[in-house]
Structures are given as structure tokens and as C-alpha cells.
Image (tube, rainbow, N blue to C red):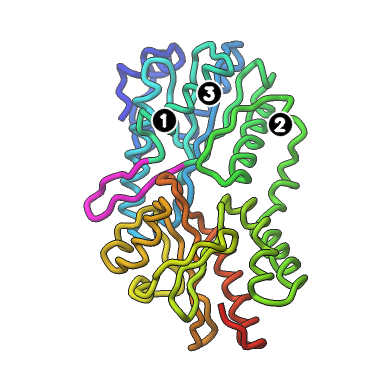
Amino acid sequence: MYTSEQLRRFAHFSSLLEDSRLEGMLDPLTGVLSRAYMLRYVQALIAEGTPFTFGMVDLDNFKFINDTYGHHAGDQVLVDIAGALAAYLDGFGLVGRFGGDEFLFVDLRDLTYDDKKAFLTGVYGENGVLRRNIALESCAPFITGTTGCATFPTDAADYDELFTLIDKTLYRGKTKGRNCHIIYVEEKHRDIEIQRIARHSVYTTMHGLVRQFELVPGLTNKLHSVMPLLMEDLRVSDLYYVGADRRLRAVRNRALDEDAADIDRLMNDDLYVSNTLDRVGRNCPALYAALEKYGMETAMVVRVGMDLEHYGYLICAEPRSHRIWQEDECAVVYFLAKMLAASMRIDGERL
């Protein structure tokens, strides 16, 4: 990826290349800087007093890519993202692999807040680094990431403080649902406590669901009671369900009532997730027509049932093609489906 000519543009690496081999500086998979050399570069810039913006990109739900398409596909995604990010920063910054599915970047320009916002908007938009399908040999996974950044010496006076601020912005991005970028702003982020944010986990959401679920009788009331929590934590505008009559309905939009008679053809397991409706369109024209009617472009479908009993489905669907459902979001809806199934078995009520 990086060549000697590219790195020699930067004084730090121009000096290192006099005595060190290029191959030893690069991550063997992606060809961007290795973790060790990237961090040494950051420390050198701080020691020299050189201003720069430092950021980390954490790919969202990358384990799903490896588990679904295989590690070879995962490696290809990492190579593609590293190359796209390095090309985007070419001439004014460098990229390094921090480890796993995390990348670091340094931008040496004198950036205002608006400049940083424009730069990161480009990463997520017109320049095609994130929020895009990557065409591989047998699949085209949709890739998003969470990015946090801070600036030396404006935001932090030393290396440890700078990394702490990046950690804060990343955690903030993840609590907002990932697939976003956070620029450190002291007034907004200085009081963030990472341990407190980390405690707002899947367990916290599930605990909240149980409390709300048990407050009221009746399935319809229970679904209404958990909606505010789902809207906040899953960033969904509504929750849809299909009962024994195979009609698609919504918790909030009570007027919605559409045919979903063919939904069973979609499900090979208890969970179906996709950021497109291509498979829905091929297998379930009735369900597809219903979702398309309301502008939906991405869907998560969870079977509601216990043991061999099958009562219906919960559906999260959103009109945003860049939405990718995360593992913890799937776990939350799956947990809700199991609570509904248990309630149905005990009370005999149906969706």
C-alpha cells in the first residue's frame, strides 16, 4: 500500500527510511502503517509540538462479516477500507492499523471544527470510504464505522490525554448507535465517563425492557410500553409485527395493516437481517410490497415463538439504506420476542 516515496513526504519517515526497511513499518495485511510505527509517529509529532488531528475508525459489527462470509472476506474488507482511507488522506495525512478492525489516522492540516466536520462527512459520504457496499468475490457486504477524533494541542496537551479524548468520542459514537463520527468538543464531551457509558449495555436495555413489559397487562399495551426505550436505544421510528393472520401491523401507526402472507418463506432461522430488501423481494412479494409502500430499505425480522410453537414475527424496518443492524440491536429484539412468546404461552393471547 504505502510506498517509500509516499512516506518520504513526511520528515519523520524520511529519516527512518534511511536506516529501516519499508516492509517493517507496514501492517502486513493492509499495507498501511503498523500500530507501532503509527503510535511512534503520533508521539514524535507531540514531542515536536506539531499540531495535528488524530482519529480512530472502528468498523461496525465486523464480527458479523467474518462469521457470515468468512475471514478471507473480512480481510478483503480491511484491505479495501485501509486503501480508501489512505487515498482520502493522501498528501496531508497518514493511516495506520491499530488492530483488528480499528484504524488510526493523522491529519496534519490546521483544521477548524467545520473543517473537521467536512472531512469526516466526506469519509461517510461522497468519497466512498464508509457507508458503502464492498464488492467481493461472492458477496457485497455493507460497511459502516464509528469514528472519534481530537486535536493536539487544542484539545489535549499530551499523548495519554489525546488518546483518552478519542476513547470518549468513540464511546459516545457507539452509544448513539454507531455508524457516525464524533469530533471532540470540550463543552460537550469533557464530563463523559467511559465506565458509566460502558455500563449502558445490552443488559441495561434488556433490564429496561423487562421493567416496562411487566408494568401493564395485554400484548398491545406491553408493546406500547417498551416503544420509547426501543426508539431511543435502537433508533427506530416504529416496531412492526406479523401475527397468526399474517397481516403486517405497527405499534405506533395503528392505521397500518398490510398483507404479509408469505413472510414464512423468508425465515430459515429465528433471525433475518439485511441492509437491503433484495431477498425479501425475491422470496416474499407480499411482504416486500408492504415494506416498499412505506419506503423501507432495510429490515430485521425475528421469529416470535418458544420450542416448536410459532406465534408470529417482530420486524424492525427503516427507510435508510445506510442502516446496518448491529449484533446488540438484534439481541435486544430477539429478547423482546422471547418475552412476548412467554407471555403468549402463559396468557393465551396472540398478536
Amino acid carrying label 3: it is Lys
Asked if marks 1 and 2 touch (Cβ < 8 Å), the reply is no
Counting from the top left corner in percent of width and height, residue 159 is at: 64, 25
Residue denoted by label 3: 117
What whole-number distance in Å separates the C-alpha atoms at marks 1 and 3?
24 Å
**Where 38 falls versus 225 (above or below)?**
above
Of all residues shown, which one is farthest toward the left?
137
- Locate the N terminus by quadrant: top left
Q: Secondary structure at mark 1?
A: loop
Residue at horizontal 42%, vertical 27%? Answer: 122
Q: Nearer the viewer, residue 258 or 244?
A: 258
Residue denoted by label 2: 189
**Where 26 falls versus 308 (above or below)?**
above
Q: On the rendered structure, is 186 left or right of 230?
A: right
Q: Secondary structure at mark 2?
A: helix
Residue denoted by label 1: 33
Residue at horizontal 51%, vertical 58%? Answer: 327
Asked if marks 3 and 2 touch (Cβ < 8 Å), the reply is no
Q: Quick one: label 3 or label 2, which is nearer the N terminus?
A: 3
The part of the chain drawn in magenta is 132-144
Amino acid carrying label 2: it is His
What whole-number distance in Å separates the C-alpha atoms at marks 1 and 2?
29 Å
- Locate the C terminus by quadrant: bottom right
